[in-house]
Image (cartoon, grey):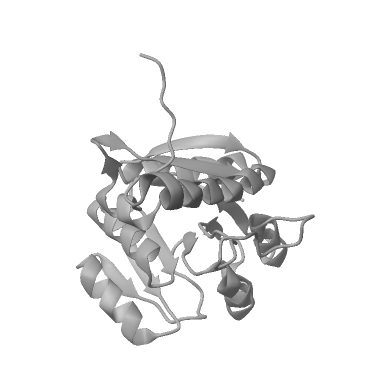
């Protein structure tokens, strides 16, 4: 799949929650056009209104306008969304931001032999590339774009180098620091890293306005 890396692009976001709002808001500020798609048209309209003039509304289930498609829905809904869109997602770059964690934080919502991003990749139509990203960055911190004046780290896992380069360029355009962590199998670790984040929030930090990142010497 040939993927160019323009400075700005059309980014389609499926979902209307906190992460959709945070990513969409930063994308619009960076000059991207943001297409919002939701099962609930009123929620799509409300999010587009918050994002501003660079936002458009797409029809849920119709082929997204953007080559980058952010899957900003809960993991329990994402596979149904994939089926709903079907071939409309063919040849798209699918950014999986989901965290397949049980509501009581006791474990994960996928078979022990698999992981969330792998299940999404299995459901993807031909030509689509799945890249895991943004799942360790909470919406509260992402909406600001930094913590303590430092750019947030976005960990990126995927099997196609061009697709990862495109997601890295997109993240960088938002003022974030992309960090390539390897192939899509590494998404298993990123999904477990969210459990670490939840543990820190619950037992140590006591609020959600922080992010997991890398500190480099010097």
Image side of residue 63 versus residue 211, left or right: right
What percent of the width, then of the height, locates residue 44? 34, 78
177 vs 2, nearest the viewer: 177
Against 18, residue 212 (above or below) is above
Instruction: Give the image quarter of residue 59.
Output: bottom left
Residue situated furthest left in the rendering: 53
Q: Is residue 55 left or right of residue 191?
A: left
Q: Is residue 4 visible?
A: no
Q: Residue 135 appears at what percent x and percent y? A: 49, 52
Q: In terms of depth relative to the viewer, which is nearer, 111 or 71?
A: 111
Residue drawn where x is 47% and y is 81% of the image? 60
Tell me if residue 22 comes above or below residue 83 in the rendering: above
Instruction: Name which quarter of the figure residue 21 lies in.
Output: bottom left
Locate the C terminus by quadrant: top left
- Please state which of residues 63 and 208 is positioned toward the viewer in this rendering: 208
- The percent position of residue 137, horizontal first and vertical second, equals 42, 49
Q: Residue at x 40, y 60 (%)?
A: 11
The answer to whether residue 58 shows anywhere in this view is yes
The location of residue 22, given as percent across then percent down, is 32, 59
């Amino acid at each position: 799949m040939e993927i160019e890396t323009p400075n700005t692009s059309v980014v389609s976001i499926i979902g209307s929650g906190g992460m959709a709002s945070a990513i969409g808001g930063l994308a619009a500020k960076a000059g991207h056009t943001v297409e919002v798609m939701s099962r609930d048209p009123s929620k799509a309209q409300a999010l587009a209104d918050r994002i501003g003039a660079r936002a458009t509304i797409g029809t849920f289930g119709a082929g997204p306008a953007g080559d980058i498609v952010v899957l900003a829905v809960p993991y329990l809904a994402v596979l149904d969304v994939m089926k709903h869109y079907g071939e409309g997602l063919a040849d798209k770059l699918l950014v999986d931001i989901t965290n397949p964690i049980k509501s009581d934080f006791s474990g994960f919502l996928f078979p022990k032999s698999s992981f969330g991003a792998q299940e999404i990749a299995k459901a993807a139509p031909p030509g689509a590339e799945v890249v895991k990203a943004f799942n360790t960055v909470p919406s509260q911190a992402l909406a600001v774009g930094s913590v303590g004046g430092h750019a947030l780290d976005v960990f990126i896992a995927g099997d196609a180098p061009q697709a990862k380069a495109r997601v890295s360029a997109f993240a960088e355009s938002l003022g974030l620091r992309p960090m390539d962590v390897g192939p899509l199998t590494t998404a298993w670790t990123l999904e477990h890293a969210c459990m670490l984040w939840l543990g820190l929030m619950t037992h140590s930090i006591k609020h959600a306005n922080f992010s997991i990142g890398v500190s480099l010497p010097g």
